[in-house]
Amino acid sequence: MEQFKTYALMIGLTLLFIWFGGMIAGKTGMIVAFIAAAGMNFYAYYYSDQAVLNHYHAIPVDRAHASGLYEIVERLTQRAGLPMPKLYIIPEEQPNAFATGRDYEHAAVAVTEGLLELLDEHEVEAVVAHELSHIRHYDMLIGTVAATIAGAIAMLANFGMFFGGGDRDRPNPIVMLILMIVMPLVATIIQMSVSRNREFLADEGAARLTGHPEWLQSALAKLDAYARRMSMPEADPQTAHMFIINPFTGKEFSMRELFSTHPSTETRIERLESLKKA
């Protein structure tokens, strides 16, 4: 069912991109958008995981090199009924983590050195459970495709400044308003909404997998506090949605709740609190 939802969202976002291409340049725009969307989805499906791991200089580890982390992940995957993902450690001081990969058999979990130094064993387990919940629900692929399509729509909007209105000699002001403002905004909001909703679901999944919501509450509080005063030099806005805590937390502005890829940590902790009473 989760896999079906993933592919349905991918198709929906692709159709939105193709329709938008048609708005800009008619049938030609639709054809170009279709080819571009096919290429982007192919790349996102097969290569985005390795690209993001390379970007953050993630180092693969196994039981011999990170026995404590390996045993935590192994225990949780057995409990969740998931294959053992590949494990990576990122040489980065900011404590954070993410999961990537197109499916269960090609999944990977990456944690920073800062996270392993900051959190205790129970908190690390809660963070890993959160990332495994993302894997279980195919969130990594959904987030990557949503971010890719949103970025492509924004580029099309800029392109439309010169070619808006299809075959018309002069762009219609109303069409240009839609191209330049409304559509990129809608695409961004869709991406953000998908990402925030998936974070809530992964938090809940982690709490149920460990049986201890308070472990994740404690981990989130620590990670958020450090992210506010410690930047991640290699952080990329296109991959920020993948992390358990937004690596740009300390750089966000007053409207961060609307345009952030993550719900506020306070809200996440409150929702986890309600699970204790369930």
Image (cartoon, rainbow, N blue to C red):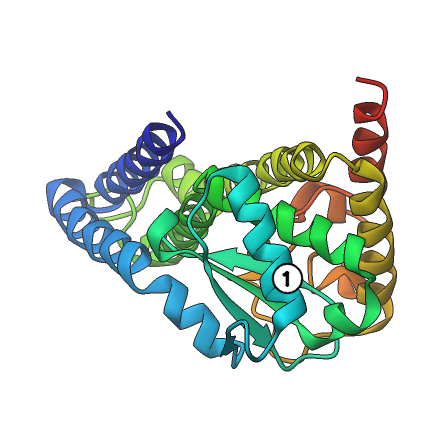
Q: Residue at x 38, y 48 (%)?
A: 104
Question: Which quadrant would the C terminus be assigned to in this image?
Answer: top right
Q: Is residue 46 left or right of residue 79?
A: left
Residue located at (58% from left, 59% from top): 98
Q: Specify whether 200 is left or right of 21.
A: right
268 left or right, relative to 71: right
Which amino acid does the dot numbered 1 rest on? Ala
Q: Residue pushed farthest top? A: 278
Q: Which residue is mark 1?
A: 97
Is residue 265 in sight in this rendering?
Answer: no
Q: Is residue 239 above or below residue 116?
A: above
Q: Position of residue 231 (x, y in %)?
A: 75, 74
Mark yes or no: residue 76 visible: yes
Quarter location, residue 121:
bottom right
Badge 1 density bin: few <14, some 14–19, many ≥20, Cα 10 Å: many
- Residue at image position (66%, 72%) is 112
Residue 273 located left or right of residue 38: right
Q: Quadrant of residue 205?
A: top right
User: What is the secondary structure assignment of the residue under circle 1?
Assistant: strand
How many circles with numbers are drawn on the protein?
Answer: 1
- Camera-side residue of 113 and 75: 75
Q: Residue at x 52, y 44 (%)?
A: 78
Q: Nearer the viewer, residue 159 or 275?
A: 275
Q: Quadrant of the N terminus?
A: top left
Q: In front: 1, or 229?
A: 1
* Residue 90 placement (x, y as % from top left): 60, 76
The location of residue 216, given as percent across then percent down, is 78, 45
